Image (cartoon, grey):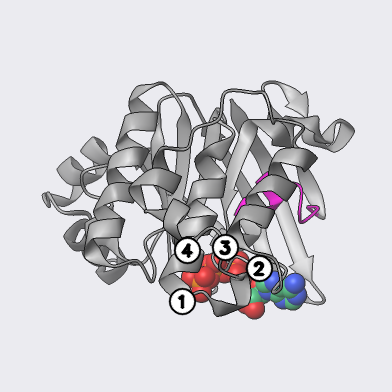
Amino acid sequence: MIIASNVSKKFGKMKVLDNVSAACNKSQCIALIGPNGSGKTTFIKCLLGMVVPGSGFITFNEKNIIHDWRYRANIGYMPQIGRYPDNMTIAQVLDMLKDIRKSKSQQLDEDLINEFNLPALMNKRMSTLSGGTRQKVSASLAFLFNPDVLILDEPTAGLDPLSAEILKEKITTEKKKGKLILITSHVLSDLDDMITEVMYMQDGSLRFHKSFEELRSDTGEQKLSKAIAQVMKNN
Ligand SMILES: Nc1ncnc2c1ncn2[C@@H]1O[C@H](COP(=O)(O)OP(=O)(O)OP(=O)(O)O)[C@@H](O)[C@H]1O
C-alpha cells in the first residue's frame, strides 16, 4: 500500500533520515517507535508529502506520490500538535474541512465526535479548548472522512484514560476493517493490544521492521515496553 524506498532527508547538514526503506500494507497496525529526534515525525511527513525527501521515493498504491498529491485524500492524519485557526469554533473547523474535502454528502465517520461528546462543545472557539479537547478534535478529524490509511502521531498524548480507551478501541475497529494504521507513541503500554508490527528508528535509520510476534519471540518479552527496552540495551 505504502512503500518507502531508500528515503533520505537532510535539514541543513543534519541527516535526519538515512536510507529508510519500508513497506506498509492493509490491515497492519504499525508502531513507529524510537528515541526523541530519531526521525519518526519526519518520516511520517515524507509519507504525507509534507516533507520532500532529498533522495529515495515513496509509492502509494504503486504510484510515486511525487506525481500525484491526490493520494492524500486516502489518509487521515492526526498530528502531534494540531494547529487550528484560534477564532474558529469546533463546528466551523469541521465544516471548513468538510468543505475542503468536498465531502458534505459523503458517508462521514462521526463515531469519535460523538463518543468524545464533542457535539456539546461545538460552539467553543479553538483558542479556548483544553489540550485534551484539542487532541479529541484532531483524532475526530483524522477518522472523519473514512480514509483507508490512518497516520497517528502520539494519538493518546494528553487524553484522559477514558478518552484514550475510546480512541484505542476505534483504532482496533478500523484495523479490523482492513485499514492500514501507523502510530507513533512513547506510551508503549498503549500499543500492546493494537499493533501487528513494529518499526524501530534510531538516528534516522530504520533499525528493524518486524511483526510484533517476531519481536516477542526474539526478545522473550510479551510487552512492547519490555521488548523495546531489551532491544535498546543490546544496541
Ligand atoms: N523543519 C525542520 N528543520 C530543521 N530540523 C528539523 C525539522 N524538522 C525536524 N528537524 C530535526 O530532525 C530531527 C528529527 O526530528 P523528528 O521530529 O522527525 O523526530 P521524532 O523521532 O519524531 O522525535 P520525537 O519523539 O521527539 O517526536 C530532530 O533533530 C529535529 O530537530
Q: Residues within 10 Å of mark 3 (few under 14, many from 20)?
A: few
Q: Secondary structure at mark 3?
A: loop
Residue 160: image location, x then y, percent: 28, 67
Amino acid tagged 3: Asn
Is residue 169 shown in magenta? no
User: Which quadrant would residue 175 be assigned to in this image?
Assistant: top left
Residue 135's label in the rendered image is 4
- Looking at marks 4 and 3 on the same chain, the residue that comes earlier in the sequence is marked by 3
* Direction from residue 224 to residue 17 in the image, left or right: right
Amino acid tagged 2: Arg
* Direction from residue 118 to residue 6 in the image, left or right: right
Question: How far apart are the two marked residues, 2 and 3, measured between alpha carbons?
Answer: 18 Å
Viewer-proximal residue, 160 or 211?
160
Figure label count:
4
Question: How far apart are the two marked residues, 4 and 1, measured between alpha carbons?
Answer: 9 Å
Q: Secondary structure at mark 2?
A: loop
Amino acid tagged 1: Ser
Q: Quadrant of the N terminus?
A: top right
Residue at horizontal 57 percent and vertical 23 percent from the top:
107
Residue at horizontal 80 percent and vertical 31 percent from the top:
70
The stretch of residues the image draws in magenta is 44-53
4 or 1: mark nearer the eye = 1
Which residue has dot 1 on it?
A: 130
Residue 76: image location, x then y, percent: 58, 41
In the rendered view, would you say 49 is above or below 177? below
Residue 123's label in the rendered image is 3
Q: Is residue 38 visible?
A: no
Q: Say whether marks 1 and 3 touch (CB < 8 Å).
A: no
Residue 189: image location, x then y, percent: 22, 59
Badge 1 residue CB within 8 Å of ligand 1 = no
Residue 223: image location, x then y, percent: 15, 54
